[in-house]
Image (cartoon, grey):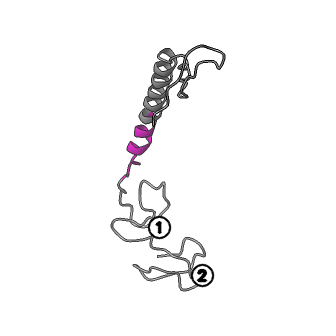
Amino acid sequence: MKCKYCGAELPNGTNFCTNCGRDLRNLRKCVKCGEIIDDDATFCPFCGTEQPVYQEDNSSKTKLYWIIPIVVVIAIAVGAFLYLHRDKAPEPVNTSTTMPPEDSDTTVISPP
C-alpha cells in the first residue's frame, strides 16, 4: 500500500508511514486488499472490489430541528400566560399601628 500523504510504499496493515510519520489508521481502506483508497471511491483502484457505501447518521441533526421549535413554542406560551394573567401590584399593607391624633378626645390605655 502507498501512503496517501507522501506516496511511500508501505506493507499492508501499516498504521503509520515510515517515511513521513503520518497516522494512517483512520484512512479509508479497501475491504478486500487493504490498500488506502479515496474517501469517495466506489471501487478499489488496486483490486477492483466494490466498496460499501456508509451513510451519515443525521439523526442528531433532525432531533435538533425538532427541539428548537418546540422550545420556542413553549417560551411563547409561557410568556403569553404570564402576560395575560398578570395582576396589578397589590396595595402596600401598612403594618404600623394607627394612633389617634393627639388632639382627639380619646384616651389610649397602655398595658402595665
Q: Is residue 41 above or below residue 101?
A: below
Residues at marks 1 and 2, CA–CA distance in whole angstroms = 15 Å
Tell me, yes or no, whether the highlighted magenta stretch contains residue 54.
yes
Residue 29 percent location from the top left of the image: 42, 67
Q: Which quarter of the rendered picture does the C terminus lie within?
A: top left
Which residue reaches farthest bottom?
Answer: 18
Disc 2 on helix, strand or loop?
A: loop
The residue lying at 48 percent from left, 22 percent from top is 82
* Front one among 63 and 41: 63
Q: Is residue 26 above or below residue 87?
A: below
The residue lying at 53 percent from left, 23 percent from top is 108
Span colored in magenta: 53-65
* Front one among 104 and 79: 104
Residue at label 1?
27
* First along the sequence among labels 1 and 2: 2
The residue lying at 59 percent from left, 13 percent from top is 105
Question: Is label 1 in contact with label 2 (beta carbons under 8 Å)?
Answer: no
Residue 48, which numbered label? none
Q: Is residue 54 above or below residue 11?
A: above
Residue 20, which numbered label? 2
Q: Which residue type carries mark 1?
A: Leu
Label total for image: 2
Disc 1 on helix, strand or loop?
A: loop
